[in-house]
Amino acid sequence: MTRQNMAGSDILIAVIGVTGAGKTSFISRATGRSDLRIGHGIDSCTENVVAVTYMLGRQKVTLIDTPGFDDSERSDTDVLELIAAYMAKSYENGTLLTGILFLQPLSQVRLQGSEKKRTRLFKTILGENAYQRVVIATTMWNQLSETEATARQDQRKIRADVWGDMISRGARVVRHDDNAESATAIVQLLAQFQTPVTLQIQQELLACNGRVARTSAGRQLDEDLGAEIAKLREEVEALRLAREDTASENRDLRDKIAKLEQERDKLQDSDYRQLERILAQVIPLVLGVALGVPPCIVQ
Ligand SMILES: Nc1nc2c(ncn2[C@@H]2O[C@H](COP(=O)(O)OP(=O)(O)OP(=O)(O)O)[C@@H](O)[C@H]2O)c(=O)[nH]1
Ligand SMILES: [Mg+2]
């Protein structure tokens, strides 16, 4: 395989990462292009896989912008299909990647389940053999203190279920400072790779006639969706039980209300003169019993 791929670029880099990670911003910084759609709102932005080519010195570089997982509009399945279709087509055309840039924002305080899940999904797209061609660039450093950002980056580096396993197979972690110099340095790091790399999903799609569901990434996503469905079903069941409890509590409360209302009615009907009459009859009777006088005498 020659160093220049069939796309005519010397360097071909796929830029991946969750929505809002800063993929399009990175490409804009690296290429100096100001016409790329960067998402400044809460909605996800890039809707399709878009290749942006520019000259870096004497090298022709193509950066492939991808829609991010965790999109506000599209499901992870839609995003996986888009990435898979692009990667499969370029593999068939002989357009092979030089490297992969994986962007990860450090803005999340905790390493949340969703981040772990998406990282796992990216890993299954790439495959272990491609890890050595991965540069993980952390973004959003200017949104938090240096100490905090470093701590969050280190936390992800040491954990095997996050980046640890990728690092032990050659992936590198660098900081991206959201400016042109930083972006160029990262592209140069990726441009050092001499031979093209094939992603696991590219090989798998070819082997299984393009069926995304049969790839490792497809199976991983299916597992994640299954886990999410099971969790939601548990929540539905918990709500149903809570509703039953509430229904029985409601019945108890209704009984209590009925009793109180009866008591209230009784109170309304009560007539002290009637009470006096009753007492007038009862007291002599009691007295008579106490004195040993037969009841008929008292009467
Ligand atoms: N503070 C800070 N903001 C950044 C950085 N990178 C990107 N942003 C901002 O983050 C927001 C999202 O950036 P995008 O480049 O659109 O993110 P994306 O990964 O392309 O998102 P999708 O297209 O939805 O997948 C924009 O407001 C950017 O200006 C960074 O390193 N630091
Ligand atoms: Mg984008």
Image (spheres, rainbow, N blue to C red):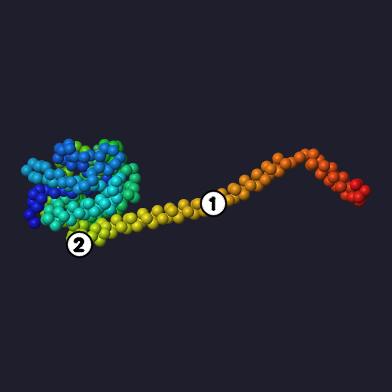
Residue ID at (59%, 48%)? 253
Measuring 45% from the left and 55% from the top, which residue is drawn there? 237
Which residue occupies 19% across, 37% down? 179
Against 142, is 246 above or below? below
- What's the residue type where badge 2 is placed? Asn
Report the residue marked by disc 1.
Answer: 247
Q: CA distance from mark 1 to mark 2?
A: 54 Å
User: Crowding at label 1, few (<14), some or many (≥20) Cα neighbours within 10 Å?
Assistant: few
- The reply to whether callout 1 and callout 2 are in contact (CB within 8 Å) is no
| Total numbered labels placed on residues in the image | 2
Of 41 and 31, the residue lying toward us? 41
Q: Identify which amino acid the numbered label 1 is placed on.
A: Ala
Could you tell me which secondary element the residue under label 1 belongs to? Answer: helix
Circle 2 residue: 209
Q: Which residue occupies the foreground of this view, 263 or 185?
A: 263
Tell whether 39 sits left or right of 227.
Answer: left
Sequence-wise, the earlier of marks 1 and 2 is 2
At mark 2, the secondary structure is loop
